[in-house]
Image (cartoon, rainbow, N blue to C red):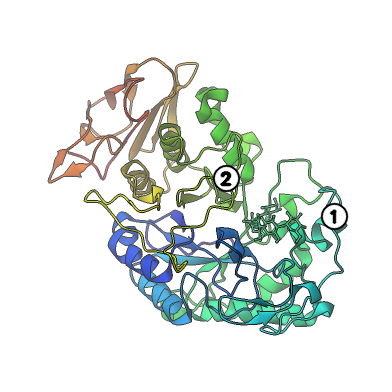
Amino acid sequence: QHNPHWWGNRNTIVHLFEWKWSDIAAECENFLGPKGFAGVQVSPVNENIISAGRPWWERYQPISYKLITRSGNEQEFADMVRRCNDVGVRIYVDVLLNHMSGDFDGIAVGTAGSEAEPSKKSYPGVPYSAQDFHPSCEITDWNDRFQVQQCELVGLKDLDQSSEWVRSKLIEFLDHLIELGVAGFRVDAAKHMAADDLSYIYSTISDLNTEHGFPHNARPFIFQEVIDHGHETVSREEYNQLGAVTEFRFSEEIGNAFRGNNALKWLQSWGTGWGFLASGQALTFVDNHDNQRDMGAVLNYKSPKQYKMATAFHLAYPYGISRVMSSFAFDDHDTAPPQDEQERIISPEFDEEGACVNGWICEHRWRQIYAMVGFKNAVRDTELSNWWDNGDSQISFCRGNKGFLAVNNNLYDLSQELQTCLPAGVYCDVISGSLVDGSCTGKSVIVEDSGFGYIHIGSEDFDGVLALHVDARV
Ligand code: QV4
């Protein structure tokens, strides 16, 4: 279940973290479809516990499988899926199969109004009771398989996926979403569930809904959250046959390189050469909603120049199933998404250039990022060739005769005749500008009959990357 069922030549997923369904529906029609995005990962859709201050992570604590959250209700969800599919943008749902909520004093009320008594493992909204869970214990040793898979991840009540009842409830939930037209699932905390149990669930759920444009017998796309830094007892290799797996080493190493801790010349062997999963099994990202909040090498929107360079490399290099992050502004781990005084999530607002203004970051609306989504579409199915580097952190390469990328992460200029592999002509650098009414608002590059062009990326330039492709020819 590795096929994301993309439409046409599209091939990039965006995670619209904490967005409302009605806003995503509009975004599919107004922006994602026109710009060539392939799909959206949406936040958890089923009822969750309500936590004080409404941190984003309350949505990782389910109370029932009713489709009512701060992002909207079932009707709004169904409307979103329909409208996005209609413009060729797929929906992938973040699903919590591992656990229910954590402890709570007394009776908790969820976002759909269901009551639960987490301390007794009682969730009548499903219903689940204590016998559907593993006995409580803490994970103290992350290399102990029993603890990782049968104890409680940060105290979240741990479902027993070997039980017939639990399996039937999970399958019913996933089938409901498939019926509504989704293309697949991000499986949260997959590492904390036995691969055999997941295999049973994945193989039992329905085919995708043909009324939403999927072919007959199409299996749901599965990508599993398994964090494997290498040498772990529960490894990514237990899951990659079942579906794609989040490749966290990609995120860590790309952050490391673009922060300047590793020369970019080493990226020539990026991908399996770095010990990553096979390209078709790896869900790749510069940052995700968890590690963008951690200190460390991972890049996020707060280091925009490096972040845009890393994203350009991510989307230009032929490796992985790409996902870009779209965040809201945060100070710390618990910052809630943009909300009003009644704690309702607010809709993103845009300035005249299309950038988000009211607490939403919307990296996917940054020109340097959506332009690379277009680049990745334009060069789809071409090989990488003509790698060039300066022995340090200036690099360039071609994608067939359709695209060319150059990056300068040194503290001096890149000024050089380079092989672009493109047919002779004038091309618009889609990073510094765009093609408007046939003329380029940024840097233009003249490509000679030989394929060479003069490339300049000053160390002080606003962006450290230059990208040309055949769909942006002046
Ligand atoms: C607290 C204590 C625990 C204690 C518990 C007792 O910290 O030690 O056992 O109380 O009740 C929130 C709080 C957390 C609290 C917990 C339970 O932050 O302090 O525990 O709730 O009340 C997200 C957030 C977590 C959040 C959780 C549930 O990141 O902070 O916990 O949602 O709301 C590993 C896993 C990987 C996981 C990653 C974070 O292998 O699977 O850790 N990633 C996924 C999601 C992530 C999500 C979860 C899993 C859980 O990507 O966003 O956690 O669904 O690497």
Q: Visible in this render: residue 267? A: no
Give the foreground label among 1 and 2. 2
Element under disc 1 = helix
When asked about the image quadrant of residue 255, the answer is top right
> Mark 1: which amino acid?
Arg
Could you tell me how many numbered marks the image carries?
2
For the residues labelled 1 and 2, the Cα–Cα distance comes to 27 Å
Q: Residue at the spot x=55%, y=49% of the render? A: 288
Q: Visible in this render: residue 340? A: yes
> Mark 2: which amino acid?
Arg
Q: Residue at the spot x=31%, y=54% of the render? A: 35
From the top left corner, tell me how far across and down residue 118 is, in percent: 74, 73
- Residue beneath disc 2: 293
Left or right relative to 273: residue 405: left
- Residue beneath disc 1: 145
Element under disc 2 = helix
From the top left corner, tell me how far across and down residue 64 is, in percent: 64, 78
Pointer 2: residues within 10 angstroms few (<14), some, or many (20+)?
A: some
Left or right relative to 48: residue 377: left
Q: Residue at the spot x=78%, y=41% of the render? A: 231
Q: Is residue 64 above or below residue 263?
A: below
Ligand 1 closer than 8 Å to label 2 CB: yes
